[in-house]
Amino acid sequence: MTPLLRWRPLRTLSVRQTLVLGAGLSILLPALVLAYFQVTSRLEKEVELRVTLPMQQYADVLARGVAVAIWNLDRGVATELVDAVMRNPDVARVTVSDEYREVFVKRQVEGLVEGDILREERPVTYSGKRVGHLVVEMSTTRIKREFLVDLAKLGLALLTQVVISFAFILMLLERRMIRPLRDLESGTTRMAAGDLSRPFHWFRADEFGTLSGGLDRMRQNLAALLSEREQKTRELEHELQERRRTEAALVFSQAKFAAIFDGSPVAMTVSHHGGDFRVRDLNGAWERMFHRSRSEIVDSSGTSNGVWRNQTDREAMIAQLSQTGAIDDTEVWMCRGDDLADILVSITGRTITLEGESLLILAFVDVTEKRRIEGEIRALNATLEQRVNERTQELTEAMERLQATQSELVRSEKLSALGSLVAGVAHELNTPIGNSLTVASTMADQTRDFGAAMASGLTRSRLENYVANTREGTGILLRSLRHAADLVASFKQVAVDQTSVNRRRFNLHDTVEEILLTLGPSIRKTSHEVRTDIPATLSLESYPGPLGQVLTNLINNAMVHAFEGIAHGVVSISAEEQGDSHVKLTVQDNGVGIPAAHLERVFDPFFTTKLGRGGSGLGLNIVYNLVRDALGGTIMVASAPGQGACFTLVLPLQAPVVDPTTA
């Protein structure tokens, strides 16, 4: 019982008083709650429509309007816009500030009450740039005042409604509830006194009419004990029918089990568990596996039906069944009919109890072919190790031949580079030597003419002309021969470096220039160029020969692969010191770049995208081995399609000493 119902004054009220009180509260309380939510919802909607939405519209309009005024520092225009908004009596305050939050224009009403203020802010932007800040504040005081007046009117209407409702409810309670309760009270008094002959009367089909009908049925049911006995009889008959249906379902289940057993693809038998384990039943799969009929095997024992090839296997299986109560994958040889060969069978069995009888269910799986294949696999594995050793020996010999071939190709690549060097230098020497030969022959002709002139008489002007021509010719001859001598010296140094592995101190700038001098003819045959940016003071204690071959291969690789479809390509060679012990040498081109799928393989031997078109696949592999083994450094490549390739070499200023035969 709730605390309200346990309150003593309520417990002393009559039914009429309780109903009146309950009806009054049920009318008044929901009316008050509903009125509260309606008034609150109306106030929120009024505030939304008359304050919030106009305030947002004012803020949007003013933010766009005052942007130009703030940008032009025109307070007059901004003030007119703000005053136009202030004409709304609900607008309490408008503040416009510049981008430094200093007040540009501000208007507010007098006697402002801060507690009833709503606020809306907007940034002021001009041409995408924030130039100020806008704050619009509106008051809800006038709306709340109107709301209180409406609330008073609503309360008066609600009070009138409650008074009228109370009067109408009191009249209905008297006619539809109090009078029927009195009639029911007199009727139940008669039933308590034992008068069951007078029925209950009711005139309306309401709750009291239903209660009167129920009491009358109660009176009638007191004389219906015989009908209850008949009902119990019918229930017993229903239970008997249910039992018959259960027995029929059991018969159907047994038939279904028999069908599943006989249709199973696994050979199965059912035997009596105990004694001589006579066979009670078997399925068609067992007949097909063993080529024996059902009539031949059913009601027979394993000791006499000739299925077991070795009775000791049967006895061992029975012993296992006695110990563990189950048989799991036990393999035995069994005999088939029709003079067929014996088969190796895997037997699995479980015991069950059916209608008080212990039975053994066995499943038979033919594993003869499986075990034969496993034996062949074991024999194959026995010879596998020998075949693996033979194959390993063959692969070892093939690897040795491959390494020898690779070494020969590397030597051929070096000789090819040297041959290109010789051809280039020969082409370079052709010009100065040809010029020298031309000058010398010209001077010989002039000397012969001068001798003939001396025999006929020599003039001063003829002598001066001969001396001037001789001086000019000897100058040209000396310059050409000096150029040829420089070329021969450079070629000699580069050739010695590339055909031997000698460790010496050299200037990196001069060495690179000598290498480019020897590569000049092959470079000038193309429309591309090589640029250098190497400090003149950078020196290394290293191996100039391998370094020259590295640069030659990188430049030739760029000329072959980098500039397809490019009219004028540039290869840039730069160097800079890294700390006190290393130098970073960079070879970069502005070519087509290396695809991402090829970056990890560019240093692999025999990897080339121009096989049969001038690419051997060994150029960058030689570069990688020389940088790592001979120069003691590292090389990395970075590239992106269409952005060229960059090879970065990090070399020690003092290279480690290496064996010349391995470099």
Image (spheres, rainbow, N blue to C red):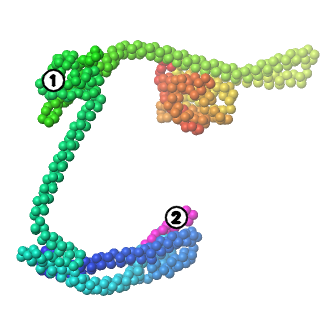
For the N terminus, the image quarter is bottom left
Label 1 sits on residue? 318
Q: Which residues are magenta?
A: 119-133
Secondary structure of the residue carrying numbered label 1: helix
In this view, the residue farthest toward the right is 456
Q: Nearer the viewer, residue 449 or 595?
A: 595
Q: Is residue 424 visible?
A: yes
Residues packed near mark 2 inside 10 Å, few (<14), some (14 to 19) or many (20 plus)? few
Q: Residue at x 49, y 66 (%)?
A: 123
Q: In the rendered view, does 129 fall on the left or right side of 238?
A: right
Q: In the rendered view, does 555 fall on the left or right side of 341?
A: right
Type of the residue with mark 1: Ile
Secondary structure of the residue carrying numbered label 2: strand
Q: Nearer the viewer, residue 16 or 150?
A: 16
Q: In the rendered view, does 467 fall on the left or right side of 98?
A: right
Q: Residue at x 42, y 77 (%)?
A: 46
Quadrant for residue 17, please give it: bottom left
Type of the residue with mark 2: Arg
